[in-house]
């Protein structure tokens, strides 16, 4: 059925964030990069997914909404406080997912920003010294106004897009591929990793739960381990989000966006909230 005029406007608005308020970083590394990330932090993402990463000597990035700790969700029970602490002790990285899991497109920018601040404050209170260095937009591609408002708080903000970061990455909207979209087909992921390897890009893989009976947002441990094994065999450097940025910045160069309304790199706050 054809989209209504209102539907077309919403579609255009959602897509417009990809071309505005960019903060561009050239990817020029000796080895291709891969990062594994988990949204919402259902407990299985650490207990099963984290254990699989650790079995290969790897760690990932966990995007958490502190306001959801211990609650049930469509992807299973969310982290409890001990899980947050365990993730950090085991070398994983924590990222911000807003305090209340605010829809990145539907939520007003000022409300979204307040939820980010609340999440960062809550983490500091629960785990003294811990800080969020990156964010994942919950539920949706961000609204352009939200993308502009949030960029100053984090080293990078991750979105979806089902694509790789090749050539140049927009740090205000890093692309990722949700593993559940592959339908358990390792060949789909293998092709992405092969493309990323050839281009020496940055592949970010995302999911939610890692369970024998996954939700529509998650994947099975068997499939996740297949993906990790293929990633390891590719010779890629597999690191959490902000570590990947450190590697890219070590050999790359910052370039100013050609868009007049680009956010300058100087607006970044190293190590979390201002």
Image (cartoon, rainbow, N blue to C red):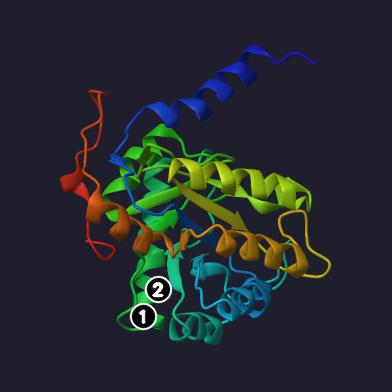
Q: Residue 152, relative to residue 4: is it above or below?
A: below
Quarter of the view holding residue 217: bottom right
In the rendered view of the protein, which quadrant contains the C terminus? Answer: bottom left
Residue in view at x 70 percent, y 70 percent: 72
| Place of residue 188 in the rendered image (x, y in percent of width and height, measured from the top left) | 70, 45
CB atoms of marks 1 and 2 within 8 Å: yes
Q: Nearer the viewer, residue 30 or 225?
A: 30
- Of all residues, the one furthest to the left in this rendering is 266
| Place of residue 153 in the rendered image (x, y in percent of width and height, measured from the top left) | 29, 54
In the rendered view of the protein, which quadrant contains the N terminus? Answer: top right
| Place of residue 260 in the rendered image (x, y in percent of width and height, measured from the top left) | 22, 23
Q: Residue 135, relative to residue 27: is it above or below?
A: below
**How many numbered marks, from 0 up?**
2
Residue in view at x 67 percent, y 52 percent: 179
Q: CA distance from mark 1 to mark 2?
A: 5 Å
Q: Which residue is mark 1?
A: 125
Q: Nearer the viewer, residue 196 or 139?
A: 196
Q: Which residue is mark 2?
A: 122
Quarter of the view holding residue 28: top left
Residue in view at x 57 percent, y 54 percent: 205
Q: Is residue 73 visible?
A: no
Q: Residues within 10 Å of mark 2 (few under 14, many from 20)?
A: some
Q: Nearer the viewer, residue 11 or 158?
A: 158
Q: Residues within 10 Å of mark 1 (few under 14, many from 20)?
A: few
| Place of residue 244 in the rendered image (x, y in percent of width and height, measured from the top left) | 37, 58
Instruction: Give the structural element (helix, strand or loop) at label 1.
Output: helix
Q: Is residue 147 visible?
A: yes
Instruction: Give the structural element (helix, strand or loop) at label 2.
Output: helix
Q: Residue 175, relative to residue 74: is it above or below?
A: above
Q: Nearer the viewer, residue 263 or 121?
A: 263
Residue in view at x 41 percent, y 82 percent: 126
């Amino acid at each position: 059925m054809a989209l209504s005029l209102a539907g077309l406007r919403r579609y255009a608005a959602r897509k417009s964030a990809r071309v505005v308020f960019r903060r561009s970083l050239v990817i020029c590394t000796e080895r291709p990069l891969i990062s594994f990330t988990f949204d919402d932090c259902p407990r299985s993402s650490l207990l099963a997914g984290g254990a699989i990463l650790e079995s290969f000597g790897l760690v990932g990035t966990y995007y958490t909404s502190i306001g959801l700790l211990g609650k049930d969700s469509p992807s299973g029970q969310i982290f409890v406080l001990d899980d947050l602490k365990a993730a950090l002790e085991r070398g994983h990285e924590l990222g911000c997912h807003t305090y209340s899991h605010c829809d990145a497109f539907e939520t007003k920018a000022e409300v979204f920003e307040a939820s980010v601040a609340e999440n960062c404050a809550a983490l500091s209170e629960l785990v003294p010294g811990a800080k969020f260095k990156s964010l994942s937009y919950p539920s949706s591609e961000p609204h352009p106004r939200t993308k502009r408002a949030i960029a100053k708080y984090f080293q990078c903000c991750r979105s979806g897009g089902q694509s790789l970061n090749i050539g140049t990455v927009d740090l205000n909207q890093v692309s990722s591929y949700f593993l559940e979209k592959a339908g358990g087909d390792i060949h789909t992921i293998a092709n992405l990793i092969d493309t990323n390897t050839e281009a020496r890009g940055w592949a970010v893989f995302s999911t939610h739960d890692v369970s024998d009976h996954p939700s529509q947002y998650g994947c099975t441990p068997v499939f996740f381990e297949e993906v990790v094994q293929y990633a390891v065999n590719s010779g890629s450097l597999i690191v959490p989000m902000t570590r990947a940025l450190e590697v890219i910045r070590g050999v790359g160069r910052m370039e100013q966006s050609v868009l007049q309304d680009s956010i300058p790199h100087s607006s970044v706050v190293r190590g979390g909230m201002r």
